[in-house]
Image: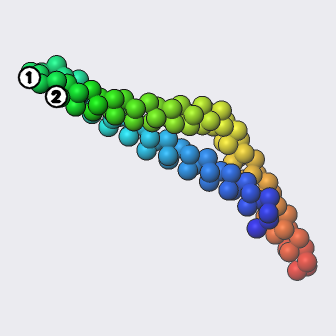
Amino acid sequence: MSVALNLVNELISQYDELEAQYATKREEQGSIDRELSDWYHCVEGIEITHISQSHKMIKRGKDILERRRNIKYETLIMKATLDNLKHSITQIKKNVKIVVDKDTAVRQEIKDRAKI
């Protein structure tokens, strides 16, 4: 395989990996959103009898919100990148297939002519 084709295939693989990572991060974000919803319900229903309870609740909420913010930041970067590259990668895949198929056909034709 040629160096150029290897590099193009690596680029496509990286794009595919980014898509997979994006899906995983979206699942993580959904999980954190459910955790945050549970936390809100807990805050709604708790009867605070001591200040340390509220302190614990706030710390837990801050932790959940910080993790959510980090995941959201990552997913926004990934989505922007994927959205911008999607059409280009699709076009690259199509064009590379055309070039590889044509090259394969030409090489086969050369071999066939040599047999005559």
Residue 73 relative to residue 52: left or right: right
Q: Is residue 43 above or below residue 104?
A: above
Label of residue 49 in the image: 1
Residue found at x 62% / y 54%: 13
The alpha-carbon separation of the residues under discs 1 and 2 comes to: 7 Å
Q: Residue furthest bottom?
A: 115
Residue 76 drawn at (x, y percent): 53, 31
Name the amino acid type tagged 2: Gln
Let me know if residue 105 appears in the view: no
Q: Position of residue 30 (x, y in %)?
A: 35, 34
Indicate left or right for 87 with 99 as reference: left
Tag 1 and tag 2, C-beta contact below 8 Å: yes
Measured from the top left, where is residue 95 in percent x and y?
Answer: 75, 47
Mark 2 crowdedness (10 Å alpha carbons): few <14, some 14-19, many ≥20 = few
Q: Depth check: 6 or 76 in front?
A: 76
- Spot occupied by residue 34 in the image (x, y as percentages of width and height): 28, 32
* Residue 53 tag number: 2
Q: Secondary structure at mark 1?
A: loop
Q: Residues within 10 Å of mark 1 (few under 14, many from 20)?
A: few
- Say what amino acid the circle numbered 1 marks: Thr
Judge whether 102 appears above or below 45 on screen. Answer: below
- The residue drawn where x is 69% and y is 48% is 93
* Label drawn at residue 57: none
Tell me the quarter of the picture where residue 85 sits.
Answer: top right
Local SS, label 2: helix
64, 35: nearer the viewer: 64
Give the image quarter of residue 1.
bottom right
